[in-house]
Image (cartoon, rainbow, N blue to C red):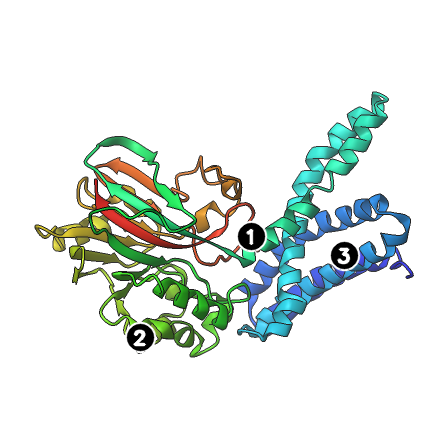
Amino acid sequence: MFAPPGWLLPTLAASIAVGLPLYAGRFRGRTYALFAAVLVLFSFPGGLALATLAQQAAPADLRAAVGWLFVYGMLTTGIHFASLVGARLRPAWFRVAFSIPGMAFLALGALAGPWLLAVLPLRWFAAEAGLPTAVAALDVLALLPLPLVAFSLGTSLGLRREVVRIDLDDETHPELVRVPTARFRRTPPAKADRPLRLVQIADPHLGPWQPTRRFRRRVEELLAHDPDLVLITGDLLTMEGNSTPGALAEALAPLREAPGRCFAIFGNHDHEAPDEVRSALAANGVRLLMDEEAIVETPAGPVQLVGADWAREERADRLRSLAMRRPRREGHLRLWLVHDPLGFADLPDGDADLVLSGHTHGGQVGLVSFGGTWTVLSRSRWPDHGLFGLGRNRLYVHRGTGFYGFPLRIGVPGESSLVEVRRA
């Protein structure tokens, strides 16, 4: 196999970096053109540098193949972003051939750029100090984004199926803290008292990583748990899903088999196509709670659901006002649905037995796949995943069924769980 000429990859990168924004600006508008330009300009330099290092490190008989793989990755990135000018859900062959490899290459370049800049001064120092073993080790270390992205493709396409047990207690936490909770990968031993059984659908983001059939199959898997409640905490679509009428309704169709048990709120992305989301929920018997409450009788007892619509402005005032308008009902388990977990801190103390949230995708980049809790959001103001306590309120942040934005999950698998809630 002959290797790609040395000028091909940088020429292709320059052509996409210039041509894609011009094409997007002409046929979709300035906002998307700027969005595409920023992503490409941030990713492609790292991709170009990593391509050179990978070809140098590869065995001689594989260098040509490695070079063409990088050409293909860059080309698919351009094709994928160009396809979003006429955004819609694409057939499986297009996702496999272009969308998924294109987004994987985008993530590879985005990771490689900062990583190579960090490794470069160490390599220079090792070379100046005459440490050939250290130089060789750093050359291998520079290629770390390659296996990391390969590993993350599996994480991004799959889900972790779990049973989560939340035992609510009356302990008061002066500050927001992560509260340990029990997670089981297999069926856990039964307990004497009957818990509330619920499943949460958070951030499915119907799109390239979660097409209609896959999402529908995952909804069917959740319903197989025979939950008392199905709770949807927002962000159902991507720009592709927004522009494909009827696709969301088809994906949610299994929910028709759980009448009176399904409730939803809007996330931020749902406000981009509110009519499409409303019609899909209504077609499948899902009640949308827009700053409203619902009272549900379940085998575990009566439940009061309070659903908060997502709002960018005056979030704290809106949540406190909703709490006053929908006060606690005696003898009911009080559950809140709040898309963004930042809103948890705005609720009056003692107002929520449990808040169910999503939005963070579990942190999306972290060590959850390896048994840890750390993610890139661990030190941020966002609760990233799992159970938290503040005052007497409790919050459960779902890792999400899908994801959107950064094009890969890295070390933070999506979640498909049955949540059992009981009083301790």
Q: Which residue is mark 3?
A: 70
Percent x, y of residue 122? 74, 28
Percent x, y of residue 307? 24, 58
Identify the residue at horizontal 72%, vertical 50% (top origin). 47
Distance from disc 3 to disc 2, alpha carbons, whole Å, reads 45 Å
Distance from disc 1 to disc 2, alpha carbons, whole Å, reads 30 Å
Contact between marks 3 and 2 (CB within 8 A): the answer is no
Is 34 positioned to the left or the right of 394 in the image? Answer: right
Check the image and name the residue furthest to the left: 330
Viewer-proximal residue among 342 and 408: 408
Q: Which residue is mark 1?
A: 155
Is 174 positioned to the left or the right of 160 in the image? Answer: left
Packing grade of label 3 (10 A; few <14, some 14-19, many >=20) is: many
Amino acid type for the residue under numbered disc 1: Thr
Q: Which residue is mark 2?
A: 256
- As helix, strand or loop, the secondary structure at mark 3 comes to helix
Percent x, y of residue 156? 55, 55
For the question of whether residue 295 can be seen, the reply is no
